[in-house]
Image (cartoon, rainbow, N blue to C red):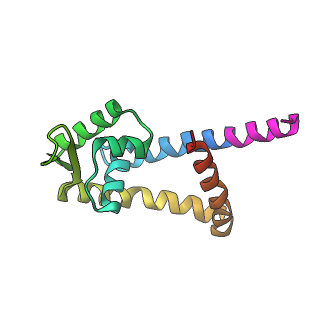
Amino acid sequence: MSTQTDSLSIALFSEIFTADQLARNRLSRALPKGMELSHFSVLNHLARTSEEKTPAQLARTFHVTRGAMTNTLSKLEWAGHIHIRPDWDDARRKFVAISPSGRRARDAALQTIAPILAEVVEAIGPDKVRAALPVLREMRVRLGEE
């Protein structure tokens, strides 16, 4: 790699990491009391897929350890936002589904953060955002390859 490519790489990832940190901080402050960004992410995923998932599938989806996902799921179950049931064919496995309460919590959170996200997209310009999406998606795919 050339020095120019190294500088470009460092600049790109520095911007991504900083934007990620700023977005997480801003959205975390806007979420309803007691809801963490990880809680919203899981509820949003379950609401969008509308199907049960195993904790292992969720851990893979969010690129976290099973222990971290178990912790998040425990908090969501305690709040009544998800239902966890055993797999009737394999008692060692469990299935997770969003509850009506979880759907309402996700919808309430979405109402608080959607304007923040829309404001940023509007300020940058929808055309610039659309142009950036393919590059960001390709980066996600390439970084996900192991």
Q: Residue at x 18, y 37 (%)?
A: 92
In which quadrant of the rendered view does residue 137 lie? bottom right
Residue 45's x, y, as percent?
36, 55
Which residue lies at the image location 32% right of the left edge and 41% below the top edge? 56
- Where residue 18 sits: x, y (%)? 62, 39
Q: Quadrant of the C terminus?
A: top right
Q: Is residue 9 magenta?
A: yes
Q: Quadrant of the N terminus?
A: top right
Q: Quadrant of residue 3?
A: top right
Where in the figure is residue 123, as x and y percent of width and height? 63, 62
Q: Quadrant of residue 78?
A: top left
- Queried whether the magenta region covers residue 2, the answer comes back as yes
- The residue positioned 59% from the left and 62% from the top of the image is 121
Q: Main secondary structure of the magenta part?
A: helix
Residue at horizontal 14 percent and vertical 47 percent from the top: 89
In the rendered image, the residue lying farthest to the bottom is 127
Q: Nearer the viewer, residue 10 or 88?
A: 88
* Residue interval drawn in magenta: 1-13
